[in-house]
Image (tube, coloured by chain):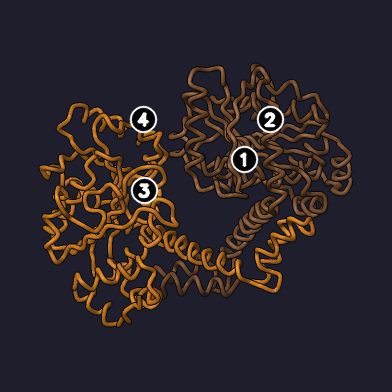
Chain colours: A orange, B brown
Amino acid sequence: MARRTVDVPDLVEQARAGSPRAVARLITLVENDHPALREVMAALAPHTGHAHVIGLTGSPGVGKSTSTSMLVSGLRGRGLRVGVLAVDPSSPFSGGALLGDRIRMTDHVLDPEVYIRSMASRGHLGGLSWSTPQALRVLDAAGCDVVLVETVGVGQSEVEVAGLADTTLVLLAPGMGDGVQAAKAGILEIGDVFVVNKADREGADNTVRELRHMISLGDRTEPGLWRPPVVKTIADRGEGLDDVLEALDKHRAWMDDNGELHRRRVRRARSEIEAIAVAQLRERMGVLGHGEDLATAAEQVVAGETDPYAAADRVVAAL
Amino acid sequence: MARRTVDVPDLVEQARAGSPRAVARLITLVENDHPALREVMAALAPHTGHAHVIGLTGSPGVGKSTSTSMLVSGLRGRGLRVGVLAVDPSSPFSGGALLGDRIRMTDHVLDPEVYIRSMASRGHLGGLSWSTPQALRVLDAAGCDVVLVETVGVGQSEVEVAGLADTTLVLLAPGMGDGVQAAKAGILEIGDVFVVNKADREGADNTVRELRHMISLGDRTEPGLWRPPVVKTIADRGEGLDDVLEALDKHRAWMDDNGELHRRRVRRARSEIEAIAVAQLRERMGVLGHGEDLATAAEQVVAGETDPYAAADRVVAAL
């Protein structure tokens, strides 16, 4: 199937002017690894860096989608343009559809200042799709003031979302993730803001207390360092929204003040560039020819004519 | 601490002459990423390719160590030189020690024709240590006829051991891993030989039947292709040993006949070279200088002066 030619400058212009259709189209180009991808990225670059990227993670059942929806409402109430990337196969709004009981985000789907997009969760970056960072750039360049990246907290994905985000919000629910469990799951290290949702349930205060205790045991309590706050919410009633927004604002202000925002973004850009470069190099290694490509080198190692280190040197030298 | 200088040719000579001490020393050099590592690998290369590498994997509790011990006895009975690499934190002979109830391999520790070595299970290659393939080369060059690589079958490690081995033996026990469970765990794809251990337990025949059924459903049943046999053992009594050895021999002969052994080894060498090359390139990318290193590129991306793809192009070009 022949791909339609894409007028990239026009599409970027439309996206920046606020066209949800243009934004959606750009993300689709990114997801499909379209030949125009590089042109798109180059055109977006000058317009990036504005959005506050907030990663939102937590185990299934803690109320991630409801909390995301609540946050979107709060941010819209401030007149902000909001992007939502849901990287979660079990999310009610993944699969690109918002049907049936996938109701929680429907408050926002008709709002032209809210871009909601689900992403496949598999990909080269492990739990997070390869295209997630690129989709983030699209939403950023399209003028989103905040982009929420929602991922399910299983395995590596919460660590990865922490790598993508300026601020990482970890969601817990009473009885599901108390302090010790959180410590075991490695969640204490990645959270900038902790939210105990379903705070009307038994044990909520206990969970908050334990979390605070575990955080206080951490090494992030010297003056000038950030001590992650623990906030209670009942997301489906909108309770606690102001406290969460305040915590996010404070974290953003703290990062701005001491250069942490810049450091995090440089780290993120660095991994992204490195991943792209390594993928390119891997591909080249396979097709070098002149007896210096991987296939030939592997034959020579098997024949005992050389060793893997010497072979790697030759492959690298021939690149 | 100053490292002792190493007389590599002498050490390799001694190892090839059958000195367990020299073999142990070489593996330690490999594990410690000693400066002489490259010289060691180059000196070993001409002597590699003899050993039949057998990967042995299975869930905790199926009797991996007992089975390894039984296999060692059988191979020694044939007068073969045997190496054992145990890549398993919970193995009775990991940690480099053989104490207390770590008794199962003690039949062999005093046998100068058996080299037993435990390896740390963490490493750059995920579940398998970075140094595992290099340690394999040491044992191969030291004249081992067979090297058994034992890993615990959790997560990715069984897939990785399959990548390292000429023949992959998957261990199961009745009631623990029936056919359907094995299929779910992705174990059917990697096994060349299946062993149902603890065959005196209830349900053993059932497990064998289910496994055979699942295997027959696979796509490996065309003429000339290998259909993995399912063998029953009671490893702590040595029962079934001959059947296992016969199955391993047949698999080896089949691989020799149709070139599969060579193909597998080339694939293995290729991944090994690629991993070494990528590690080198990653390191270089970090220190390129002249504004082409990763750190500078990342700053430019954050500033919106370039995009990650263009930055990656420049980094790659500068290598």
Q: How far apart are the alpha carbons under marks 3 and 1?
A: 54 Å
The chain letter under disc 2 is B
| Label of residue B96 in the image | 2
The amino acid beneath tag 1 is Thr
Instruction: Identify the residue shown where x is 18% and y is 27%.
Output: A202
The amino acid beneath tag 3 is Gly
Q: Quadrant of the N terminus of chain A?
A: bottom left
Q: How far apart are the alpha carbons under marks 4 and 1?
A: 39 Å
| Label of residue B59 in the image | none
Q: Which residue is mark 4?
A: A180
Q: Earlier in the sequence, mark 4 or mark 3?
A: 4
Q: How far apart are the alpha carbons under marks 2 and 4?
A: 32 Å
Q: How far apart are the alpha carbons under marks 2 and 3?
A: 45 Å
Q: Position of residue A201 (x, y in %)?
A: 17, 30
- SS for callout 3: loop
Q: How far apart are the alpha carbons under marks 2 and 1?
A: 24 Å
Please tell me if label 2 and label 4 are on a single chain.
no
In the displayed structure image, the side of residue A118 where residue B274 appears, left or right:
right
Quarter of the rendering containing residue A45: bottom left
Q: Position of residue A266 (x, y in %)?
A: 43, 62
Q: Residue A223 or A62: which is nearer the viewer?
A: A62
Q: Can residue A236 be seen by looking at this rendering?
A: yes
Q: Position of residue B154 (x, y in %)?
A: 51, 36
Q: Can residue A253 be seen by looking at this rendering?
A: no
Instruction: Identify the residue shown where x is 35% and y is 60%.
Output: A132
Q: Which residue is mark 3?
A: A224
Quarter of the rendering containing residue A82: bottom left
In the displayed structure image, the side of residue B109 where residue A144 appears, left or right:
left
The amino acid beneath tag 4 is Val
Q: Which residue is mark 1?
A: B168
- SS for callout 1: strand
